[in-house]
Amino acid sequence: MNAISSDAPAEAAPGRVVLLTTSHRVAPGLLSWPAWQALHAADRVLCADGAHPQLPYLREAGISVEEAAPTAEELVGACAGGHTVVVVATGEGEPALTDGLARLAGSGRVRMPELELLPASYDLPGARLLDLVQVMDRIRAECPWSSLQTHKGLAKYGIEEAYELVEAIEEGDRDELREELGDVLLQVVFHARIAEEHPEEPFSVDDVAAGIVDKLIHRHPHVFGDATASTPEEVKEHWLRTKAVEKRRTSVTEGIPLGQPALALAAKLASRVRTAGLDVPPPRIDGIGYELLTLAIRAEAEGVDPEAALRAAARAYRDAVLAAEGAEGS
């Protein structure tokens, strides 16, 4: 790297340092207007990384960029005389330089230039999802285990992660909830990455996202269209109506996964029957299974999730077992 120097006397005006940061998740060249103003007005523009993705766009805009990695002392000297120096930060954010400037400022022996941190581009909400896609792509290509996985092989992990997410919600643990949401998201991205390799019908995570975006917009005409809905019941009515048109189902039972837990299955069937206005009582057959079915239908009608209710009761029973074990051991 080239060192920088200044012939300005030490007593001259201290000048200004602008540390320009950019996001690698935003296309190079898409900088904020204040950033372009600072770059065009600067006396010198420095960048330690000659391969920085922003450099071709800056030079195309007529900005001369010097490849240099100045020390804090050199940078302060380059600003002397009232000069403005813009430092285009590398991906690490120039920690050595900023630490050096902080030490100089704290010493009280140096007349410091004005220091400004100027974000030139910002991450939009969801930007870290791009990182996840890139990381998953590399893992799929380079990890001996991940490169061999299939949709069927990963299916069990999707079920496990969904249950762990439910447990985190019921426990009310915010840290655990964030982690489990990440694990569920990983399953989505992993499956989408595998799907890219299908020889006849490939699709990507962008196709997955596009599909759900289109579905959400279409099923929320009260948000994205001219329909109106002021209550949750009206929203659900919109959803079911548009879904029925999309799916063109001949039975209310279509689309209900039979592999889900039995209580949830019974409640889902009851919900579809009730929503459709059908009068289908449960089979009048003796047996615990039919008794449970009747309870599940009753719970759904009363707005209770029977699966969650039984889980809560089971947890209370577990606590009672632990208490009994503790009493016997004391």
Image (cartoon, rainbow, N blue to C red):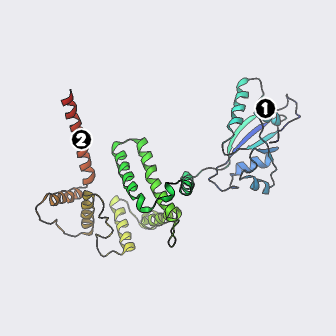
**Quadrant including the C terminus:** top left
**Which residue does the image show at 21% across and 38% down from the upper left?**
321
- Quadrant of res 244: bottom left
**Quadrant including the N terminus:** top right
| CA–CA distance in space, label 2 to label 1 | 66 Å
Q: Nearer the viewer, residue 77 or 160?
A: 160
**Vertical order, 13 against 298 (above or below):** above
Q: Nearer the viewer, residue 210 or 185?
A: 185
Q: Amino acid at mark 1?
A: Glu
**Vertical order, 92 against 306 (above or below):** above
Element type at mark 2: helix
Assess disc 2: are there few (<14), some (14-19) or many (≥20) residues with their C-alpha within 10 Å of its C-alpha. few
Left or right: where does residue 66 sit relative to residue 327? Answer: right
Residue 34 in view here: yes
Q: Amino acid at mark 2?
A: Arg
**Where does label 1 land, which residue?**
73
| Picture coordinates of residue 156, whole percent (x, y) | 38, 56
Q: Nearer the viewer, residue 114 or 46?
A: 46
Left or right: where does residue 148 sit relative to residue 65? Answer: left
Going from N to C along the chain, the mark reached first, 2 or 1, is 1
- Quadrant of res 257: bottom left
Assess disc 1: are there few (<14), some (14-19) or many (≥20) residues with their C-alpha within 10 Å of its C-alpha. some
Q: Nearer the viewer, residue 42 or 71?
A: 71
**Where does label 2 land, which residue?**
318
